[in-house]
Amino acid sequence: MDLICQNQGHKNQIEFVCMKDSCQECRFSCFECLQCGNHKNHIEDVQKFSAFLNLIKQQSFDYDDLMNKLENWINHMNNKFGELKKGLETRFKEITQLSKNFNITHFNEVSSCFFSFQKSKQELYQLITENIGSLSETIKNSRKILCLEEKSHQQISNKELKPFKYELINQIKDEYIFAFAFNKEATILVAGYESSKIKVFDFQQGQLRQMQELSNHNKRVRCIYFLQKSLSFISGSYDRSIILWEAQENRIFNCKQVLEGHTDDINCLIINNNDDLIISGSDDKTIRIWEKNDKWQSLQTLTYHNGSVFCISMNETQNQLISCAADNLIVVSQKDQDSSLWNIQQTIKVEWGSRLCFISNTLFTYQPYNKKQMIIYEQNKLNQQFIKQKEIAVKFGKDCFWYFPQKYIQSKQLLLNKNGSSLNLIKIKENGEFLQEQIIDFDDNYIHGAISDDGEYLITWDCKSEEIQIRQYCE
């Protein structure tokens, strides 16, 4: 069987298939696909295509065996129900005959059963009902295990179907804050201020205790991002610099390195999963890629945009980057596996907007400026180009300040999207359905905030209340 790979125009013969049940990438791959990083995070689940064909044949035998067993079980149950029904019919005839022509002798023969039935019929009904219910539940669960439910009615999990809400648990007056970031465990919170300082807080169940104040920047701090594998974070400022802050076990942060190269204000920062790549966007219209060797250094400057870069996001396999800017373009960049340099793959003309976020390798969201719709883009499997799939209704306001990035929490399948004066909290189901679960309206478009990596805590600061507001996820 010769099947040709269509991924990124490879045109090679398919040799591998991914067996991970939750994989959202194209399951069939050629050797070149794997070299490009496909299924990188779960490569142990990738098998040879020939092994997959053998598995299909084996499953055919397994299904046939299961069908035979199921038929035997059904026949057995039918026989048992038939015996019960036949016994009840016989007893019904006897009682009917007594009601028509009472016979003392015959009644004496069946009296024990008669009085027993009168006494125990409720117990009998309950026994049958419970067992029928248990059997129905067994059949229902069997359908789920075998994935026989209709997809349009498929439930992802009991937890996902539960309604949720972020409840306000703490309010603290503070001066203007532009950016927040939690560490991975949500035990440390860092805040970047308009005054150029950074405060480090101990965070315990919504309570803040200031541990440190950092003052190395000399202009407002616009973005902060924690590393995943070390107690470190980066900050970007209007002073055009990026600072790497590092702490030891005492959780006291010190300036480890200053990254300079941007010629205008820095608007956004992200770090890859391996903590060895920083990507920054600036008002100088460029995106800079910083690589970690002994020290961080500039690897590449992307000059695709012709306006201030507002937001950047990487996909799950870390080989694609999307960015949006004041030039009304979304740019999709692809990482070259040989040179590790990033090349433009696609440009998408859009309405002006400042928020986007990858949901998976093949899906991302984009929020046009203060519009009542959020746009969903999906990657075409044949030509690998992202195309507009649909629009989702969201709450908006009179105006929208462009900081406060979108964030997707995979563990809760939850998207946080600031738009106008509102925070839209949206559940994304596996069948592609987007559900607006909660709207938090601040009556002010100057809202800044962040959400913890596990989605348990949402923190904001807004101009109207001038408060740090901490909310906790509640089901």
Image (cartoon, helix red, strand yellow):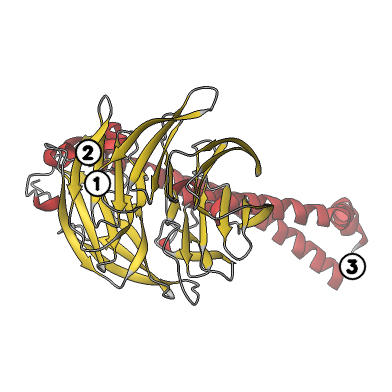
**Does the residue at mark 1 contact the one at mark 3 (Cβ under 8 Å)?**
no
Between residue 190 and residue 170, name the one nearer to us.
190
Badge 2 marks a residue whose secondary structure is strand
Picture quadrant where residue 19 is located: top left
Q: Position of residue 281 (x, y in %)?
A: 30, 52
- Identified at 58% across, 48% down, the residue is 457
User: What distance separates the C-alpha of mark 2 from that of mark 1?
Assistant: 7 Å
Amino acid tagged 1: Arg
- Identified at 29% across, 45% down, the residue is 279
Amino acid tagged 2: Ser
Q: Position of residue 329 (x, y in %)?
A: 24, 66
Question: Which residue is at the far top?
Answer: 249
Above or below 385: residue 145? above
- Between disc 3 and disc 2, the foreground one is 2
Q: Is residue 254 left or right of residue 42?
A: right
Q: Which residue is mark 1?
A: 288
Picture quadrant where residue 430 is located: bottom left
- Identified at 7% across, 45% down, the residue is 12
User: What distance separates the C-alpha of mark 1 from that of mark 3?
Assistant: 100 Å
Q: Which residue is mark 3?
A: 102
Amino acid tagged 3: Phe
Q: Which mark is residue 298?
A: 2
**Does the residue at mark 2 contact the one at mark 1 (Cβ under 8 Å)?**
yes
Above or below 407: residue 259? above
